[in-house]
Image (spheres, grey):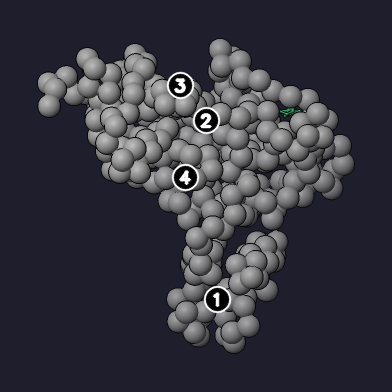
Amino acid sequence: MSNNLVKGQIIKLISDNYYVKYNDDIILCKARGKFKKDNITPLVGDLVNFDSEGKVIVDILPRKNELVRPPISNVDQAVIVISVKEPNFSSLLLDKMLTIIEHHRIKPIICFTKLDLLKDKAEKNDIKQYMKYYKSIGYKVYTNRQLFLLKRLFKHKLTVFTGQSGVGKSSLLNAINKKLQLKTETISTALGRGKHTTRHVELLQLKGGLVADSPGFSALDFIGMTKENIRDNFIEFNKYKDNCEYRNCFHLQEPNCEVKKAIDKGHILLSRYENYTKFMKDVLL
Ligand SMILES: Nc1nc2c(ncn2[C@@H]2O[C@H](COP(=O)(O)OP(=O)(O)OP(=O)(O)O)[C@@H](O)[C@H]2O)c(=O)[nH]1
Ligand SMILES: [Mg+2]
Ligand SMILES: [Zn+2]
């Protein structure tokens, strides 16, 4: 065994070239042949021991978590970027992303964009109510104009930016750090193709942390998630569940359900419950 083993983190992967961050250097490494034999694929985000002389990755340290799409490990938090227009706000999509991200034990942060496109007062009010509600249940909620606050979120963290194509993920990252110069696209072309402008997975250094401007988490479905998982990741329901008559209440048809009472009283947002019941049906299919 070599004496030159040091610990780094994979920040980019192009075919079988691994770019490993070691202090302030980026070192191009290969993976040890044994990984392939054992059917192990090093992922972007992996903490690794590598031989700094031979430039070979020798071990992958245990992963905190692992996403399939985008293929990244050790994710601490996800910024869910959601536009209020172009594309229109969808509470269904937001709740879906929240549920999936919570399930992966990743901390969600919500960032609304394109509020400048809201002309109608009622529409603006509507969005404000949503923002207030998600804050009230414990999420960090921002708009893309709150750069001062957003800039403080990244230190020592691995953050994934996620959300539909065209919501403004790359634009927001560029605003946080002008040097990034990520490619952005006008909305008509982005939507027309229905594809993400941003494709490959790479961790960028941002404000003392690492971020991935990922090509879509949104495509991810409730893969591997059970009804229980979905229920338990609607975080505000958990405060009421112990008082439901049934110990394993799904808050659907059961009598004396405290969650449903909380909805009737206006303590839980109706759209949250409607989206929840929809997801429960989807998972049963
Ligand atoms: N009006 C308005 N337009 C915005 C705002 N943020 C971003 N845009 C525009 O929205 C379009 C799409 O932005 P991108 O940053 O490319 O979106 P993206 O989320 O990175 O999209 P993909 O890479 O395709 O996933 C661009 O034309 C941006 O200029 C905003 O706050 N207001
Ligand atoms: Mg992009
Ligand atoms: Zn219940």
Name the element at disc 2. loop
Q: Is residue 212 visible?
A: yes
The answer to whether the residue bearing label 1 lies less than 8 angstroms from the nearest atom of ligand 3 is yes
Tell me how far mark 2 sits from mark 4, CA to CA. Answer: 12 Å
Name the element at disc 4. loop
Q: Earlier in the sequence, mark 1 or mark 2?
A: 2
Kindly identify the amino acid type of the residue bearing the numbered disc 3.
Gln
Tell me how far mark 1 sits from mark 3, CA to CA. Answer: 42 Å
Residue 132 placement (x, y as % from top left):
64, 49
Tell me how far mark 1 sits from mark 2, CA to CA. Answer: 37 Å
Name the element at disc 3. strand
Tell me how far mark 3 sits from mark 2, CA to CA. Answer: 13 Å
Q: Which residue is mark 4?
A: 67
Q: How many other residues sit within 10 Å of disc 3, few (<14), some (14-19) or many (≥20)?
A: some
Whether residue 194 sits left or right of residue 48 in the image: it is right
Q: Which residue is mark 2?
A: 201
Kindly identify the amino acid type of the residue bearing the numbered disc 2.
Val
